[in-house]
Image (tube, grey):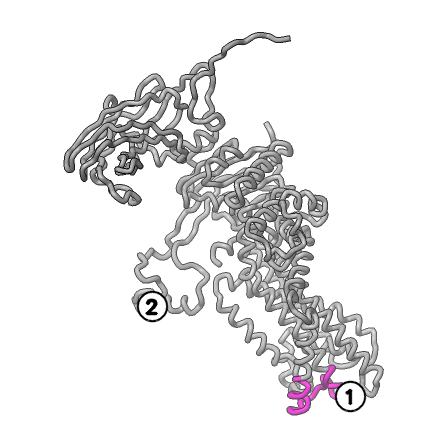
Amino acid sequence: MSETMLKVSHISKQYKLGQIGGTTLRDELQRWSAKMRHREDPTQKIGAVGYKAGETFMALDDVSFTVRKGERIGIIGHNGAGKSTLLKLIARITAPTKGDIWMNGRVASMLEVGTGFHGELTGRENIYMNGAILGMKKKEIDAKIEDIIEFSECRQFIDTPVKRYSSGMYVKLAFSVAAHLDSEIMIMDEVLAVGDMAFQNKCLEKMSDVSKTEGRTILYVSHNMNTIWQLCERCIVLKHGKIIFDGDVEKGIDCYSENNYSNEPAVNYEEIPGPRWLLAPKIRLLSAAYTDRKHSKFGTDEKIKFRLAWENLSRVKNVGLRVEIRTLSEIRLATYVLYDFYSGEADKKAELTAEFDPHEFAEGFYYMTFTFFEHDVRGSQADIECRKGLCFEITSTKHTGKLNWQPAKWGYLALDEIEALSVAEIG
Amino acid sequence: MYLLLTTSYKVNMEEHFKTHISSEHRMFDLHLRETFQYRDLIFLLVKKDFAALYKQTILGPLWAIIQPLLTTIVFTVVFGNLARLTTADIAGDYNIPGFLFYMCGNICWGYFSSTLHATSGTFLTNRVTMGKVYYPRLVAPIAAAFSQMIAFVIQFAMMFIFWMFFLIKGGTGIQITPRLFMIPVLVLHMIVLAVGFGIIISSVTTKYRDLAMLVGFGLELWRYGCPVAYGLQLVPEKFMGLYMLNPVTPVITTFRYAVFGFGYFNLWYYILSVVMSLIVFLIGLVLFSRIERTFMDTI
């Protein structure tokens, strides 16, 4: 068992709701005198729902976990789940309300890139400045400055004040400094969301490289599941300030995306307004349902059979249907198409029963989007109705028993087996 | 330091952790050792302040001279030639060049007030960096104090030239004495006092911005409570005890005492000022280390 680097034990962080601090004494006196005279608080925002004095909000509620050396942990959760608060506590930007955190080693916080950059200083000077703020000694920076400049791809401009940099160069330089820190624990809050794709990948590789070779511990917060996959090997899911999942990345992401998932075998669209981007809907989908089951679980040996019911808003001709399949983390996976299955007059109602064969899908959660389209006179196609549809869960793969399919690495579609034409030993 | 102290006896742990972040705060967790480890950052911050201040100016660091020079000239004309306020700190037959007298007081006061002003904005001006990265927060006011020191050194050099001029010209009471060696002590005294007040104000302004408003003109008024525009002789004897409660006064008079080689020096008042400065500084440190833990939530 490797060494424990970080131990978070029963951490809570409480924030007061409403006006705190940052006010002037005058405001405070006004509020006080209004209270004395039983009048309304004059400093309160108009229309704001009054909260009781002293009401509080738990951004983090009794969170505990342990991190071992060299682990790369992704922290995910919806906005307001407490991810950033957690990082801020570990980075010592603010203190916890309750609980303790123990750490072994220096922490480099990359909650933002380029902290402490000053526009008037040159790139080189800023490397020193930024490095020092992140806790490096001058000697350490001296030893690494060449690597940093090389990594940043900004050598040509390194002695120019950074106020003349493009925003991309600025970010590259800033990230390079952070990536070369010697800290044992690195915490990153979506800093990779900036910079171009190539540079993002370069950064991710660099991070996972230093983690593997030097045993650095990484805590990474992001909404981008792809980068979580690329970098992390363990995943913590936060919800309303609590840990709801701690374990491997795939399950963590599923757990996080569960909000998108519904186990219902039928959807009724009559109450749900259609998408706004659709300019001329000609069909109104009424309902969608699986025809042969009361749940939404399927094995790869089964077919997914569903029924759609709709109403024509105007006359339609040669209607086609696309069933777009996405994973819960919004990866567009594949699309099934049904051409020219229907033509009809306005105000008529119709129904379609259809099936497709999901035998290539990997285990996991998916959802369908139903899009009706029509060929217009010129032969181009136009979408006439589009609805987020049924969800389904695939409970086995065709590889079950032979291979443990890893969707995160190999993809969500387990394609048919390759046909071996000949195998022979040579030489 | 904070980390080592707190971990040593807290909790039954099989592993030894180097850092401990706790919800509880100890009054004297001042992070002094850690602050010292960040000395490179202090140096770089001072360098940055200096470089950024004079970038794209034609006169550059000359501005550090121009400001006290003009103030001294105005003081010489207004308080010396028009108002004819005394420039004597002690009774006697000394001939003190008014120009040097005002320059001496202004440079002293200038360093004190600019340091106080700069450190009083510690949390407000650095809130962007401090909200993203941890470094010992005390680094910021220390760097601010050293940044102001650069201007002070330039101004002091200017004064030294005038001092030499008056010394060579003769006919004044100025002498070279070993008292000159008091100057570094006095400068240190000023730093402690100014930073002490500064960090108290910066701590309180995280919640109440009012104090930030007060600092600017408060310092302007405070100047007239110090013997900068007039000599100590102007103060009636019966108010002397009260007047000397201003901890800056003994520093300024002693500074002139050291530079001119004569003047007013009262050991008791000076020690009183030292004690007051240390108390202010200590209160500042304790308050600062208390506020720094959670100021990001309220600023």
The N terminus of chain A, quarter of image: top right
Magenta highlight range: B74-100
Residue at image coords 41%, 47%: A58
Please state if A423 lies on the left or on the right of A379 as rendered: right
Element class at badge 2: helix
Mark drawn on residue B95: 1
Where on the picture, by quarter, is residue A378?
A: top left
Residue pictured at 50% horizontal, 61% vertical = B206
Is residue B192 at least partly visible in the picture? Answer: no
Three-letter residue code for mark 1: Asn
- Which residue is identified by label 2? A34
The picture places residue A281, in percent across and down from the top left corner, at: 24, 41
In this view of the protein, which residue sits in the foreground, A250 or A323? Answer: A323
With A303 as the anchor, is B152 left or right in this view? right
- Using residue B144 as the reference point, say whether residue A250 is left or right of it: left
Other residues around mark 1 within 10 Å, as few (<14) / some (14–19) / many (≥20): few
| Residue situated in front as seen by the camera: B19 or B48 | B48
Residue A365: image tag: none
- The image position of residue A337, as x and y in percent, is 32, 28
Residue A312, position in %: x, y? 18, 36
Q: Is residue B166 above or below residue B188?
A: below
Q: Is residue B96 magenta?
A: yes
x and y percentages locating residue A33 in the rendered image: 36, 69
Amino acid at pointer 2: Ala
Chain under disc 2: A
Other residues around mark 2 within 10 Å, as few (<14) / some (14–19) / many (≥20) = some
Question: In the image, which is nearer the foreground, mark 2 or mark 1?
Answer: 1
Chain letter of mark 1 equals B
In the rendered view, tell whether residue B27 sits above or below residue B150: above
